[in-house]
Image (spheres, grey):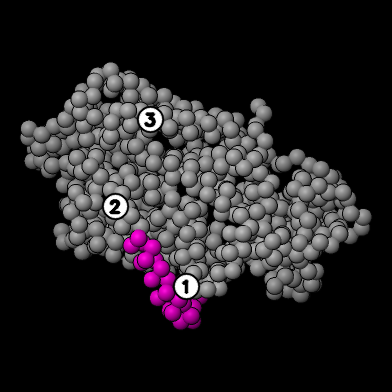
Amino acid sequence: MTLPAPSPSGDIFFAFLSILLEGAPFILLGALISGAIDAWLPSGAMDRLLPKRAFPAILVSGLLGVIFPVCECAIVPVIRRLVQKGLPLGCAMTYMLAAPIVNPIVALSTWTAFTGRDPLLMMGSRVGLGYVIAVVAGLAASRFRASSILKEGVLAGIAIPVPVEGVEAARTDHGRKFVQAMRTAQRDFLDVALYFVVGVAIASLLKTQVFYRPSLQEGMAAVAGNHWIASPVLMAMAFVLSLCSTTDAFIIAADNLFPAVAKLSFLVFGPMLDLKLLFLYSTVLKPRAVAGMAGFLFLAVYAAGFGMEALWPWLQTLTFMKP
Amino acid sequence: MSGEGEWTRRFLLFMELWVLLIWAAMMGWFYASGRINAYLIGEGTFRIQVLIGGLVLAVLGLFNWQMRHVGEDCGHDHGEGESCGEGGAHHHEGTALGRGLGLALLALSVAAAAALTPDDFSDKYKRNMLSAYASRSGGDSGAPEAFRLTPNNAVADGAAGGMTLAVVEKYQPRNAAGNFELGVQELYYSSADPEYAKVMRGQGVETVGQVVKDGSGEAGRWRVFVLQMTCCAADARPISLPVVFEGAVPALQEMGWYKLEGKIDYVEERGIAVAVLRASGAQPSLRPKQQRSLF
């Protein structure tokens, strides 16, 4: 088979397909889990699993990624379904933002990528900051009514708790439940895949046609030493490149121009918000809520970066930070 | 979606089936034909995930099509007297037309990308990436970085420890010409291990990669590079190695693929050891199809 010759438009298709082939199986996995949740998880079950009070429940939600390590592509369909099954909004937001960072696979990849460059400090800072920012975002989200944040389709699917005997009766009909799980998985996969495809297409276009232009790269290199600008520049880079959170540390660790704290901002911001996620979040949240969350995450990571900038030299001197 | 006709519902379900089958076919085809190697790394489970994902999508679509007559109750835990509405109204947003267009976009985007992708990046894009990474590693921003040939004392004086040439030969047999056939990134990363580097210094090696002129502009100085993926091609970054032709400089074409032959050496750049290929020859080569973490 003769392939088309490499070209600028071919670059877009090549990058597009590579991200799609990497991410599609994870979205499918998320959709299958979503289908199983839809069919077998009784509404209100999440209330019984999490602490009753909102604040401890949000704190626990931020750590669920340790037990259920899910990447950012797989988590969106799962969150959508869990919200419909009664997972409180604040907990859902916290889990959704924290899980791609606060999980053992990402921690290990960060450690490995930064070997020889304060790996424990970078890994701990990434996981710690990711957790704190996700919890703050969850607390903020919990103050809003679901109707002001969630999309109509998600709101309409929020289940009404039923008496226990009703749930038990439904549980016994496994054949019907299996069909339902498969049907929901298909619907969720297609719903989320549409937004994913649009996000990946835009990311591929920007990455191959804009990001590596010499003039842009020279501009980035020129501001790398400026602490006010370095972090937002790398956050913008994370947003455009739309990397998987298990991969991104390897990409940024090799960089010798930008300071460590700017790299930390890249590693915290990217898994919480990038181009493909912007569209994926739109399957759950209203556009205004997505915009608000994006603004909050940008400011929170930027501000946290300044705090870490002040603490970084001191943290580097701590002996337990040196493996 | 409420009020949606039965035929419209069936048609959309049929479209859903075809979207899933198109995606499944693309994923299965890329895996079976080996084209997946250009897109995802071999380490880990990324490639097999594509095959399994494709199979599951096909099964999902066919199962749901087969079960299309099974009751439309959504299966949710509704309260007494509650229902999902006609056709499970809360399952989808937007109109039937909108859903149809969305499904068409899903099918066409993947089909078009699969038909039009060259399985490689253009030379212009690779050059831009090479310059960008050279810039970020502290070199010139406008061109692949120039390099100096400062002897590296760490490698020269480093203790060889338990590493010997016999150990290297055990794991990496020499070819008929007596050279070690190593990838560009294997040579590149060899400088990070002083014991290994001390043993390898001066050994004959062969490597395959694309070549670009070095930023210094001096005759006989080139760089050989490959793109190394971490997970997928979109995250690939160039790994390059300085090449110095000690004798006659062959006529090399910029961005061409070559098999380079020479001796590996280690010099110092910005305080760290860097591998350099002191080349004695170059032959045009095809792009390797099966190599570790690169395309």
Tell me which corner region of the image, top left, top right, bottom left or bottom right, holds residue B195.
bottom right
Q: Is residue A310 magenta?
A: yes
Specify the amino acid type for callout 2. Arg
Which quarter of the figure has residue B201?
bottom right
Q: Which residue is mark 1?
A: A228
Q: Point out the stretch of residues depicted in magenta.
A: A295-322
Give the Cα distance between marks 3 and 2: 24 Å
Residue identified by numbered label 3: B101
Work out how far the residue at label 2 is from the one at label 1, CA to CA, in angstroms.
28 Å
Helix or strand or loop: what does disc 1 sit on? helix
Residue at image x 54%, y 34%?
A: B113
Image coordinates of residue B172 in percent, x first then y, are 74, 51
B239 lies left or right of A205: right
Q: Main secondary structure of the magenta part?
A: helix
Classify A31 as above or below A266.
above
Q: Chain of mark 3?
A: B
Q: Secondary structure at mark 2?
A: helix
Indicate yes or no whether the magenta region holds residue A268. Answer: no
Question: In the displayed structure, does residue A137 sit left or right of residue B151?
Answer: left
Rendered position, B20 above or below A225: above
Q: Nearer the viewer, residue B217 or B265?
A: B217
Q: Which residue is located at x 36 percent, y 57 percent?
A: A294
